[in-house]
Image: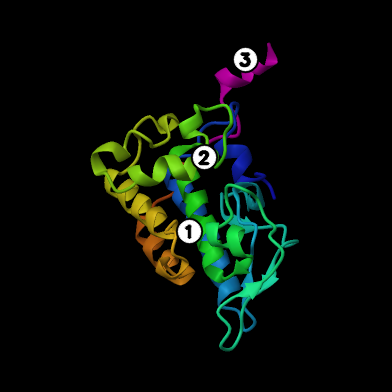
C-alpha cells in the first residue's frame, strides 16, 4: 500500500501529522472493513485490529491487512467462540484476555483503542510516559466524558485545527466502544453510521510525505 500503515504516520517524528479530516476518514474506512467482516454470511472476527494493521492507499483510504489471527465468529445460538488468547496487548478486549471468549464486540473494543490513538496521537502502550499515562485506555477513559478536559488530551500536533463538536462525538464513540461490558458496546454497523457525519465532503487536505524541517534534522 502506497502510504504504509496508520501507525507509521500517526507516531512518526518525520512525517507531517495527519489532519483531523484524514484521521476520521481512516476511522470510517476501517470501521466499514470490520462491519463487512462481522456481517459476512459466515461472520469473521478480525482479532488483531491495531494501527500497524491498517494500511493506507494514496488517498488515505484505509485497508485492513494481516488476517493471520482472524477467527470465524459464533453462529446460530452461540454467543462466543472460545480460543487461545492471541492478539496485541493494549488493544485486546479485557473479557477476551480474562476468559478467551471471543465475539465481534472484541473487535469493537480494539476499534475504540485505535480511535483513541487517532484522537490523542498517543500509543496504546507507551513505557516512555509517566507510569499513570503508560496505558492509554486506563489514562484517557475517565477524561472522554468531560468536555472541559477532553481538548487537553487531543493530539497537540493538530495545533487546535479540528472541529470541537467532531472531537466530542469521536470521544463519546470511543468511550462506548471501550465499555468493559461487551454487550453494552455498539455494533460496527452503528459505529459506521456514527462516523459518517464526521466525514468532510470537500477535498481532503492530505499532508505531503515529508515535513521539510524534520527531514533536514534527520539529514544532519
Describe the element under mark 3 as helix, strand or loop. Answer: helix
At label 3, counting other C-alpha atoms closer than 10 Å, the crowd grade (few under 14, some 14-19, many 20 or more) is few
Query: Residue placed at 59% from the left, 76% from the top?
Result: 80
Q: Is residue 29 visible?
A: no
Please report contact status of discs 1 and 3: CB closer than 8 Å, yes or no. no
Q: Which of marks 2 and 3 is in front?
A: 2
* Residue 150 is inside the magenta segment: no
The residue identified by callout 1 is 28
Residue 65 image position (x, y, % from top left): 69, 57
Farthest bottom residue in view: 76
Residue 150 image position (x, y, % from top left): 31, 40
Question: In the rendered structure, which disc, 2 or 1, sits on the residue that comes first in sequence?
Answer: 1
Residue 63 image position (x, y, % from top left): 62, 58
Range drawn in magenta = 206-220
Question: In the rendered structure, which disc, 2 or 3, sits on the residue that comes first in sequence?
Answer: 2
Question: Quarter-wise, where is residue 155 in the image?
Answer: top left
Farthest top residue in view: 220
In the image, 67 versus 218, the foreground residue is 67
The residue identified by callout 3 is 217
Amino acid at each position: 500500500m502506497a502510504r504504509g500503515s496508520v501507525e507509521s504516520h500517526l507516531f512518526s517524528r518525520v512525517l507531517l501529522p495527519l489532519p483531523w479530516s484524514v484521521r476520521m476518514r481512516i476511522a470510517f474506512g476501517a470501521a466499514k472493513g470490520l462491519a463487512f467482516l462481522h456481517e459476512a454470511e459466515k461472520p469473521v472476527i478480525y482479532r488483531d485490529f491495531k494501527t500497524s494493521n491498517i494500511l493506507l492507499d494514496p488517498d488515505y483510504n484505509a485497508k485492513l491487512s494481516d488476517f493471520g489471527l482472524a477467527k470465524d465468529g459464533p453462529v446460530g445460538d452461540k454467543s462466543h467462540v472460545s480460543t487461545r488468547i492471541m492478539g496485541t496487548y493494549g488493544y485486546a478486549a479485557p473479557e477476551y484476555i480474562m476468559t478467551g471468549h471471543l465475539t465481534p464486540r472484541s473487535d469493537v473494543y480494539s476499534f475504540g483503542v485505535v480511535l483513541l490513538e487517532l484522537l490523542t496521537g498517543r500509543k496504546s502502550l507507551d513505557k516512555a510516559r509517566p507510569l499513570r499515562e503508560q496505558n492509554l485506555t486506563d489514562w484517557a477513559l475517565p477524561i472522554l466524558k468531560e468536555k472541559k478536559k477532553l481538548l487537553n488530551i487531543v493530539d497537540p500536533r493538530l495545533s487546535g485545527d479540528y472541529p470541537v463538536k467532531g472531537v466530542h462525538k469521536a470521544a463519546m464513540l470511543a468511550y462506548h466502544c471501550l465499555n468493559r461490558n461487551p454487550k453494552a458496546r455498539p455494533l460496527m454497523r452503528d459505529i459506521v453510521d456514527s462516523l459518517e457525519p464526521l466525514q468532510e465532503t470537500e477535498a481532503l487536505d492530505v499532508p505531503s510525505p515529508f515535513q521539510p524541517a524534520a527531514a533536514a534534522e534527520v539529514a544532519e
